Amino acid sequence: MNTMTATAEDRPLWPALIKGWRRRCPNCGNGPILKGYLKVRDHCPVCREDLTPQRADDGPAYLTILIVGHLMAPLLHFVFVTWRPEPLILFTIFAVGAVALSLYLLPRLKGAVVAFQWARRMYGFSGTGA
């Protein structure tokens, strides 16, 4: 097994969050955490860490909305005040930008939320893995 595998006593938060952001297993950092776009795997294919206790639910979606809204709203205001583009052009650019940013952030935030739960031993993540 990988030397970076966490023990029951040692589950540092930041390395787990980085692994989750990269959509990798928070335990070993090698196996993919997601099957498809947003479906969390039952276990890591590399280290066999059980991922079934995760309860990400709506957390990643709320975080995505929060981040996209806080980035796009001031940018929209700045672009409108500075250049005064046509409304249809402004809407088209920002609609595509918001959708693209949301699609990029959502699986990464889901991985980070699952990794946070794993690092903090929330729900059923109290075991040491296989």
Image (cartoon, rainbow, N blue to C red):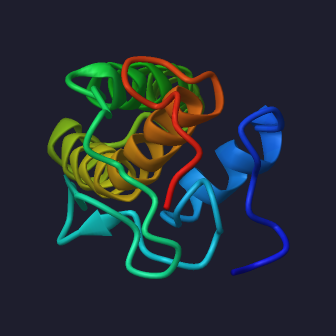
The answer to whether 3 is drawn above or below residue 62 in the figure is below
Identify which residue, 36 or 118, lies in the foreground: 118
Query: Which residue is at a point 69% across and 47% down the rendered structure image?
Result: 16
| Vertical order, 30 against 95 (above or below) | below
| x then y, percent, for residue 125 | 46, 31
Q: Residue at x 35, y 53 (%)?
A: 107
Q: Residue at x 38, y 79 (%)?
A: 45
Residue 69 in the image, given as x and y percentages of width and height? 41, 22
- Closer to the camera, 112 or 65? 112
Residue 52, given in percent of the width and then of the height, sits at 25, 43
Q: Is residue 25 above or below residue 85?
A: below
Q: Residue at x 82, y 37 (%)?
A: 12
Q: Position of residue 64 (x, y in %)?
A: 38, 31
Q: Going by the image, does 3 lie left or right of 98?
A: right
Q: Indicate left or right for 72 with 61 as reference.
A: right
Number of marks present in the image shown: 0
**Which quadrant is the N terminus positioned in?**
bottom right
Left or right of 117 on screen, residue 100: left
Q: Is residue 18 above or below residue 57?
A: below
